[in-house]
Image (tube, grey):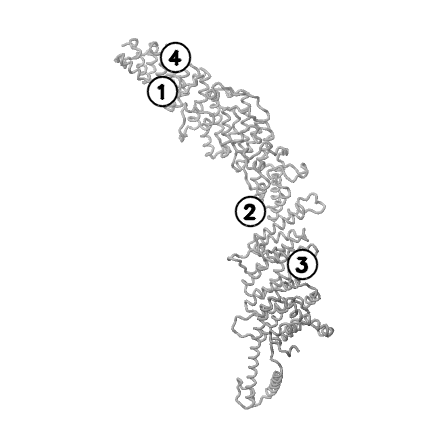
């Protein structure tokens, strides 16, 4: 059967057979002979559907072109006998049935734009390319299919450059070995728009640059070679999206990016991509900016002109937005590393090149050589909230920080240099954090940053010399004012820099404190302590310097772990006071600090543990409600430390001189008294008074400690020699007591509290051992109780008298036992003289004679007999007699200054009047409540006690009438 005899259905089936077997030569010989049954569109549909996609396009592309054009070239066609065997056995009905089962593809590609050319061959090429990619993934076949026909029409060129070329480069040229992600087909990729297309094309570049350790960046290459060609089809995508709407075009503003400059072009999504990725991968973005000049810098592979797809006005708008994106990328970076700062500096240089500005100086330039800006550019008038620094707001029209202008360029320059200086000072901050601190931070927040910087500099390890500190100070001053001198601003108290909201005085105080903390005393003195003739240039007043120095000394003191002033924080505090004391010779705080350090140093030689086993630290003194009370703990925890009373009283005097505040009621009264003393010029006298009170208090503590350790003799010595009022004090006070009110007498009684309490405490002391007391010990106790009676307030007399009575009973018992012992001894001697056996241990008789013993025996017998005769006519000795004897002994021991001449010079009437006054003070109408009016002259103390007890309390003690007479 010949070809001409075949029915149309058989012709179709035979063409399908040859296409399926990829027999292009047979098709080339067969189809021109049956144009009646095989029209060009049908043949192309058969090729699309049944010709294997893996066939090399060079084998069938010319045939397809001839089919589409209906121009079959005979010289290219080989004469091949067409074999009709596959279809000749089929009946017409069978052939028709099989033809109906064929599902031939349309020549028009899926999602082909309606405005695309109706050229049959163009549609075939686009559809065949998509089929090759979909069925085989052999993208390298597509250039052989399409590139020979790019000049056929603009649509085909645009489609190939914007769709096929990016995919070819992405899959075959740029990342041939990347099989991690499932790639999109040409149809799916062609459907991408805006942000989705940008993300798909750059995801591999982002991954590469993030993981790569070398400095070579592929992002700029991909932007030029992938995004650039893809942008070539923006017009087509926009037409597909907006149909017949056209973008409104307005003249670009030279002052920046306005709302009208937003074009809606896909390049704007590219700018958003740069800003969003700059947050975490700023180095990748900076390398891209360095290698990419903007939307006009694209690589179309020689398949088109890079500027053909953008008109001049669109080009200017997009380049202006590109510059804004570069600004925004710097502020979006969240990292505070050195690499980020250097990248921002290189971005500055790139912006200067793109915008024709003066390039920035090197980062390592000294702060004195850094560029300066006008003060008015440091404020953001259009910005009201920190939300303006959010990444999604940085590309807003007329943004105060990112709109390309000379002012915003200079401002970004200041931010970059500020971040660099902060990193050099050990406090790294991102550019956005610097911007927030500059424009939205208050003085407190900036002060926190300054203190962190100074703390880091003072703890940086190796000790810095003055040259290094001078350099750091210059950097901090630049951060405060950005090089805008105060003289230019009329001695402004605030600066223009990122730390400029801090008051200048406070800024200098922090600097001075840092210099002192790092022991740069000479530098601090040179900068802040000038002579009187140069006060105009003085950075801080002298009183402020004094306060800062004192505060630093106390800071070092509080941080010390040991009280020894030769090491640690104590040494630091002592060095600070010593270094600056010559500049403040009359400073009260310095004098107080010196006294505190001295006291603490002395305390360090004692063992002291506070509550809950906490070891003593110097700060414990400053926080104590009663620092002198710490000495009581020392006496408790250090055996026999009471013997070092001079050292302890010296510590107490220094603690009082240190001016430490106390939290009890007495301290408030003392504070008021001190303030009145300072106001009247008697501050030193009042301070000395408080020192003496502290001495008496410590002496009382020592008495308590001595008694706890059964050292009565030391306690007795401390009371007699240190707590007993002197004759001078008594004489000075006695002349005023008659006119003194009851309230003031009670106050004086309070002042004498330590004396009578110590005397009373020692007077009632009983040793812990079981040995009986001696008569001398009892006499000492009676003497101390007599002193307690003289000094105690009325409310305490009952307890003292009870102790006196017990002591009296012990004395009486001891005297009786001693008298009985003497009588027994005499009786034994009498028996020996009478010839009886000697009861004396040992034999004292030599040859039966002992003349000395006889002589002494007569004297003793005479005395005993005399004593017995006198005792028979007098009343027995009572407590009154003991009191008078104790007062007499007390007057001999405690008041040796009383002279016979002074006693004889007074008349008997004066003596009687003094005795009556004293007696009245103890037993008159006022009773013991008028205790403070007693005459305190030492020469009549004994008489006063004896007379007072006789007239006022004698009936209680059982005094006989003979004593009254």
Say left or right for 375 vs 320. Answer: right
Question: Mark 2, mark 3: which one is toward the viewer?
Answer: 3
Using a 10 Å C-alpha cutoff, classify the residue at mark 1 as few (fewer than 14 neighbours), some (14 to 19) or many (20 or more): few
Task: Name the mark on residue 66.
Answer: 4
- Badge 4 or badge 3: first in the primary sequence: 4
Q: Which residue is mark 3?
A: 686
Badge 2 marks a residue whose secondary structure is loop
The answer for how far apart the CA atoms under marks 1 and 3 are is 115 Å
- Badge 2 or badge 1: first in the primary sequence: 1
The answer for how far apart the CA atoms under marks 2 and 1 are is 74 Å
Q: Which residue is mark 2?
A: 461
Near-viewer residue (514 or 922): 922
Residue 465 visible in the displayed image: yes
The location of residue 488, given as percent across then percent down, is 67, 36
Badge 3 marks a residue whose secondary structure is helix
Residues at badges 4 and 1 in contact (C-beta under 8 Å)? no
Task: Name the mark on residue 55.
Answer: 1
Residue 302 visible in the displayed image: no
The answer for how far apart the CA atoms under marks 4 and 3 are is 124 Å
């Amino acid at each position: 059967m010949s070809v001409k005899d075949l029915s149309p259905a058989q012709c179709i089936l035979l063409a399908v057979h040859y296409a399926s077997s990829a027999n292009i030569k047979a098709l080339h010989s067969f189809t021109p002979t049956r144009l009646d049954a095989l029209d060009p569109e049908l043949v192309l549909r058969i090729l699309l559907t049944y010709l294997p996609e893996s066939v090399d396009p060079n084998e069938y592309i010319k045939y397809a072109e001839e089919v589409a054009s209906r121009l079959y070239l005979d010289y290219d066609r080989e004469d091949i006998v067409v074999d009709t065997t596959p279809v000749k056995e089929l009946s017409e009905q069978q052939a028709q049935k099989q033809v109906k089962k064929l599902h031939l593809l349309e020549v028009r590609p899926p999602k082909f734009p309606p405005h695309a050319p109706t050229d049959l061959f163009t549609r075939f090429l686009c559809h065949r390319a998509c089929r090759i990619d979909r069925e085989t993934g052999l993208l390298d076949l597509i250039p052989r299919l399409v590139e020979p026909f790019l000049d056929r029409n603009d649509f085909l060129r645009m489609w190939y450059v914007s769709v096929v070329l990016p995919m070819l480069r992405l899959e075959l040229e740029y990342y041939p070995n990347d099989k991690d992600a499932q790639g999109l087909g040409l149809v799916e990729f062609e459907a991408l728009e805006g942000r989705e297309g940008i993300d798909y094309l750059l995801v591999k570049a982002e991954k590469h640059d993030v993981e790569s350790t070398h400095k070579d960046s592929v992002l700029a290459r991909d932007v030029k070679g992938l995004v650039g060609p893809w942008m070539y089809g923006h017009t087509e995508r926009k037409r597909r999206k907006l149909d017949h709407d056209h973008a409104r075009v307005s003249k670009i503003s030279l002052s920046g990016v306005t709302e009208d400059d937003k074009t809606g072009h896909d390049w704007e999504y590219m700018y958003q991509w740069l800003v969003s990725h700059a947050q975490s991968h700023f180095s990748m973005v900076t390398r891209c900016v360095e290698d990419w000049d903007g939307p006009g810098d694209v690589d179309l592979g020689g398949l088109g002109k890079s500027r053909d797809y953008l008109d001049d006005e669109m080009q200017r708008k997009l380049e202006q937005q590109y510059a804004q994106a570069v600004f925004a990328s710097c502020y979006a970076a969240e990292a505070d590393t050195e690499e980020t700062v250097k990248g921002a500096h290189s971005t500055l240089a790139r912006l200067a090149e793109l915008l024709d500005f003066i390039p920035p100086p090197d980062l390592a330039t000294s702060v004195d050589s850094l560029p300066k800006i006008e003060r008015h550019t440091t404020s953001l008038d259009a910005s009201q909230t920190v939300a303006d620094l959010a990444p999604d707001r940085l590309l807003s029209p007329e943004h105060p920080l990112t709109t390309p202008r000379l002012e915003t360029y200079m401002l970004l320059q200041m931010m970059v240099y500020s971040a660099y200086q902060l990193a050099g000072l050990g406090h790294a901050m991102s550019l956005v954090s610097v911007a927030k601190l500059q424009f939205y931070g208050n003085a407190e927040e900036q002060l926190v940053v300054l203190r962190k910087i100074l703390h880091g500099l003072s703890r940086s390890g190796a000790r810095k010399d003055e040259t290094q500190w001078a350099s750091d100070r210059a950097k901090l001053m630049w951060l405060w004012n950005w090089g805008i001198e105060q003289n230019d601003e009329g001695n402004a108290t605030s600066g223009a820099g990122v730390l400029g909201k801090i008051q200048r005085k406070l800024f200098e105080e922090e600097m001075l404190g840092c210099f002192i903390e790092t022991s740069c005393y000479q530098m601090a003195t040179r900068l802040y302590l000038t002579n009187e003739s140069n006060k105009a240039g003085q950075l801080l007043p002298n009183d402020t310097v004094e306060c800062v120095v004192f505060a630093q000394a106390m800071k070092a003191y509080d941080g010390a772990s040991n009280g020894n002033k030769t090491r640690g924080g104590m040494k630091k505090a002592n060095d600070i006071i010593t270094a600056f004391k010559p500049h403040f010779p009359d400073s009260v705080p310095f004098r107080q600090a010196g006294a505190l350090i001295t006291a603490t140093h002395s305390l360090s030689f004692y063992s002291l543990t506070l509550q809950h086993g906490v070891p003593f630290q110097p700060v414990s003194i400053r926080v104590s409600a009663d620092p002198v009370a710490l000495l009581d703990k020392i006496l408790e925890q250090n055996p026999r430390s009471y013997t070092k009373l001079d050292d302890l009283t010296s510590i107490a005097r220094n603690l009082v001189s240190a001016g430490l505040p106390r939290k009890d009621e007495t301290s408030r009264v003392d504070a008021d008294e001190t303030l009145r003393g300072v106001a009247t010029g008697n501050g030193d006298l009042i301070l000395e008074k408080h020192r003496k009170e502290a001495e008496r208090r410590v002496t009382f503590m020592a008495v308590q400690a001595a008694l706890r350790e059964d050292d009565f003799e030391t306690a007795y010595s401390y009371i007699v020699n240190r707590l007993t009022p002197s004759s001078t004090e008594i004489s000075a006070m006695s002349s005023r007591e008659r006119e003194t009110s009851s309230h003031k007498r009670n106050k004086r009684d309070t002042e004498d509290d330590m004396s009578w309490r110590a005397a009373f405490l020692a007077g009632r002391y009983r040793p812990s051992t079981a040995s009986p007391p001696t008569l001398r010990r009892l006499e000492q106790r009676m003497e101390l109780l007599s002193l307690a009676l003289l000094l105690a307030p009325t409310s305490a007399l009952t307890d003292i008298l009870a102790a006196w009575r017990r002591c009296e009973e012990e004395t009486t018992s001891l005297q009786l036992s001693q008298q009985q012992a003497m009588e027994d001894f005499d009786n034994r001697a009498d028996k020996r003289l009478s010839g009886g056996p000697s009861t004396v241990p040992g034999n004292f008789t030599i040859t039966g004679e002992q003349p000395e013993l006889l002589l002494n025996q007569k004297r003793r017998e005479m005395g005993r007999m005399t004593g017995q005769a006198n005792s028979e006519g007098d009343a027995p000795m009572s407590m009154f007699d003991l009191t008078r004897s104790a007062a007499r002994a007390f007057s001999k021991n405690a008041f040796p200054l009383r002279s016979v001449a002074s006693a004889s010079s007074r008349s008997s009437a004066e003596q009687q009047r003094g005795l009556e006054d004293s007696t009245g003070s103890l037993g008159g109408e006022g009773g013991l409540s008028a205790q403070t009016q007693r005459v305190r002259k030492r020469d009549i103390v004994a008489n006063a006690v004896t007379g007072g007890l006789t007239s006022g309390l004698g009936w209680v003690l059982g005094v006989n009438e003979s004593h009254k007479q």
